Amino acid sequence: MSIKLIIADDHPLLLKGLKDFLEENKYEILGVASNGELALQMIEKFNPSVAILDLEMPKMTGIEVAKECLKRGIKTRIILLTLHKEKYIIQQAKNLNIAGYLLKDFATEDLINCIEKVNEGGEYFSNLIFPKEKNINPTTAEDKLTPSEIKILRHIADGVTSKEIADKLFIAERTVEKHRSNIISKLRLDKKYNSLLIWAKNNKGILF
Amino acid sequence: MSIKLIIADDHPLLLKGLKDFLEENKYEILGVASNGELALQMIEKFNPSVAILDLEMPKMTGIEVAKECLKRGIKTRIILLTLHKEKYIIQQAKNLNIAGYLLKDFATEDLINCIEKVNEGGEYFSNLIFPKEKNINPTTAEDKLTPSEIKILRHIADGVTSKEIADKLFIAERTVEKHRSNIISKLRLDKKYNSLLIWAKNNKGILF
DNA sequence: GTGGCAATACGTAGTAATACGTATTTTTTG
DNA sequence: CAAAAAATACGTATTACTACGTATTGCCAC
């Protein structure tokens, strides 16, 4: 009996490649979605074992879909595909009951291993993020970003200056700077100008 | 008689999706390469009408392949696929006899139109870069980046400070800053701190 | 109610990036 | 060879970012 899947990605050819590949490997594709909203609808309708979702999609991100599934008590196991090599995501992913995480340049064997593992109820996080030689502990509580910090980060990711953020949020510029400093410490970024901006832009899709 | 193609991309599923899609549309795929070097070998071996190359691939970039084809007098028409929405590329592309340019999130109809146009000897540049309402003139001569400017940009893209760049190149820090200022003017970047760093990082693959 | 954490805001200080210029020297092109 | 372009370097000035701190208030959980 084959594993039943929903797949979602906004890139048509990647979606096609994924669908064809999975079908060739005897998986059953119940639905193919090009945006997050459609993906959620299909997950509800078809109740697949596993959903493979791109992180950044129009209408709803992969994570937003996962969030909504959790909220509605949907049992489908979720695998996220993304460009992000970021340990911080694990914190988010675990909280949202996301079972698998693959970088978008994965090898096809990784994909198969991930689906099989996740379908059995386990978890699978790409080796490209978590090399075996490193400590795989998730981000500790003291590194957890606060709601205000995340809000500031979103603005930073939009290329807004600290002064402008302060004006928007009706707080002091110095407060924004303090938040920035705290965030840099928590994320352990390089002590370079622009580290935070680069991080924020690279991780824009997971700031929620 | 179908158009004969070579396709190259380091992403296996995208490659698969692309290959399947093209074959379904009656194109003949002579070869499928996962890196630039292999792509070049296949172009030489099979002499396709059109080669569809990802810009950023291991071993040789799509542009490096194009360069080498030009050097060897290979007549294959080249289409580049990339993430970059950057007018500056046209300057480079034209110099290298690249006939087509598509953003990686293209619609499939765009791809077909591009192949057909390019195969007839024309050029096709994605509408997503060059909206119809805007002036499509290529970068003017006065906006052309000089060799020194490009060298500086490469370092900037690596996250190196002006002072560090100056040390590496045995020039004054003030000279680096002047170059930066000139580059910002030429590229008409936003007058914001970090515009140049963001641009450099986003366009790292085309700095040559 | 109490303690811990988050949010807010300030102090002092340094520096990297950018602007708008001028000028000289070197290299390239016609 | 002469002119133009590129490379180099400096002047003056501003500001956005970051560090390393202190402190108060507000909010939340127990």
Image (cartoon, coloured by chain):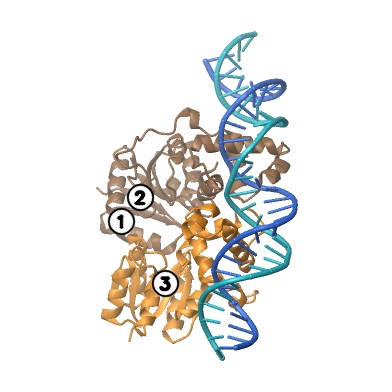
Chain colours: A orange, B brown, C blue, D cyan
Q: Check disc 2 and report the residue beneath it.
A: B5
Secondary element type, mark 1: helix
Q: Specify the subunit that label 3 lies on.
A: A
Q: Is residue A30 left or right of residue A129?
A: left
Position above or below: B12 against A134: above
Position of the C terminus of chain B, as image quadrant, is: top right
The one nearer the camera, A90 or B114, is A90
Q: CA distance from mark 1 to mark 3?
A: 32 Å
The one nearer the camera, D7 or B48, is D7
Query: Are labels 3 and 2 assigned to the same chain?
Result: no
Label 3 Cα neighbours within 10 Å, binned few <14 / some 14-19 / many ≥20: many
What amino acid is labelled 2 in the image?
Leu
Residue B56's disc number: none
Label 2 Cα neighbours within 10 Å, binned few <14 / some 14-19 / many ≥20: many
Q: How many marks?
A: 3
Q: Check disc 1 and report the residue beneath it.
A: B22
